[in-house]
Amino acid sequence: MRFISVIILSVIGLQVAGQTISDSMPVRGLCIAAPNPDMVDVFVDFIDDELAPLGLNTLVLRVDFQYEYESHPELRGEEVLTKTDVEKIADICREHGIDVIPQINLLGHQSWHTKVTKLLEVYPEFDETPHVEMPEEYKWPNEDGLYCKSYCPLHPDVHEIVFALVDEVMDAFGASAFHAGMDEVFYLGDDKCPRCSGRDKAELFAMEVTKIRNHLAASDRELWIWGDRLIDGKTTGIGLWEASMNNTHRAVDLIPKDVVICDWHYERPEPTAVYFAMKGFRVVTCPWRRAEVALQQVEDWRRIRQNAHPEIAKNYLGMMQTVWSGMDGFLEKYEDVDAQDVEDSLTGSIWSFKQLFEAMKKNFHITQ
C-alpha cells in the first residue's frame, strides 16, 4: 500500500496552514457503517488507495454493537470486529492523518423495524416505553407512531453499561472523539415512564447530552452528535425528521458549547449551520443522497465562512458525507457510479460523496 501524507490544517488565529480562514476546510469527512470482519482488509486498502488521496481526514464509523466487547460480552452483536480488525483500520488512518470517530447510538435508535437493538434485548428494563410493543411487520406510520425506541436516560443503571462500551471502543481505535448519534429521538419523557413522566423533554435531552459530554471530557475526549433535535421543527417548518416537534430544541441553550454538532439535511440545503455557529457551537454540515444538495451546501459553507465575523467563521468545521447503507455495498459499487448510475439512496450517496470531495478540493486548496 502506498503512503500518502495528508496535510491536516490547523487554525491559528485567522490563518490556517498559511491560508486565510475562508480558504480552509478543517473537517473533510465520511460517516459510514463499520465493515463486516470479512471486509476489513478491503476497507483498509480503500482508505489507502481512495479516501486518503481525496484529502479525507475524518472518518465516523458506526460501530454500535458490532465489536467484541470484553466489558459486556453479552452485548456483542453478530459478525463483530476483533481488536485486530480495529487495529488495522486505526493504523492505516493514523498513517494518513485521518481521525477515526467511533459511533454508538445513545438514547435513541434502540430499535429498528421489527426488533430492538442489543441493549434493549439484553436489558429490557432500560426501555423508555416498554408498553409499546415492536410490530410483527414494520410500516410507517404505524398505530403507535413507533420509529425507534429510546432507553430511559434516568434509569440508574444504564450509563454504567453504555459508558463501558464507549470507553472500550474508543480505546480500541485510539480515538479522541466519540459520536453518540442522538438523532430522531421521538420517545423521551414518556407519560408512562416512572422516572421521566412529566419532565421537560428539553431538559431531559440536555441532561443526557451533558452527562455523555462530561464522561468523555474527564478523559479529555470530545462529543459529537447529530443536530436535528436542537432545531425547532415548528417555527422553521422543517418538521419532525430533520428537526424537533416535541420541544427538545430548547436544549440548544442548555448543553455545553464544546459539543460538535453534525447538521444533517438531505432534501434541501437548509441553512441551519448558521444557527448553530451563532449559538457558539462548532458545526459540520452533512449531506446524503443528493449531489445537488451537497454542492449547494459546499457553496453556502464557503460563502458564510468567508463573510462571517471570525468568531462565527471559526465554528464552521467542514463537511461530512453520510452513507446509510452497509459498507459492503458502498465498496462494491463505488468505482462504477457516475451521474448516470444514480438509481437509489446507495448510489446517490456515492455520487454525492464523489461530487462533494471534488468540490472541496477545488474550493479549499486541499492537497496531499
Image (tube, rainbow, N blue to C red):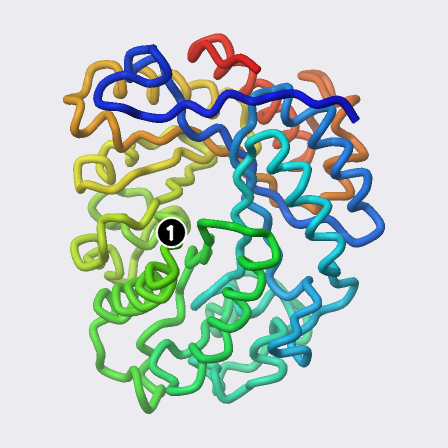
Left-right relation of 271 to 58: left
Three-letter amino acid code at the position of disc 1: Glu
Residue 215 in picture, x, y percent from top left: 36, 66
How many callouts does the rendering have?
1
Residue 47 in picture, x, y percent from top left: 69, 32
Which residue is outermost to the right? 38
- Residue at (65% x, 73% y) in the render: 115
| Residue bearing the label numbered 1 | 222
Left-right relation of 205 to 224: left
Look at the image and tell me whether residue 297 can be seen. no
Seen from the viewer's position, the closer of residues 94 and 308 is: 94
- Residue at (63% x, 33% y) in the render: 95
- Residue at (62% x, 81% y) in the render: 121
Q: Quick check: 46 above or below 146? A: above
Question: Which corner quadrant of the image does residue 108 belong to?
Answer: bottom left
Left-right relation of 258 to 177: left
**10 Å neighbourhood of mark 1: few (<14), some, or many (≥20)?**
many
Residue 131 in picture, x, y percent from top left: 48, 87
Residue 207 in picture, x, y percent from top left: 26, 69
Question: Which corner quadrant of the image does residue 24 belong to?
Answer: top left
Q: Quick check: 150 above or below 272? A: below
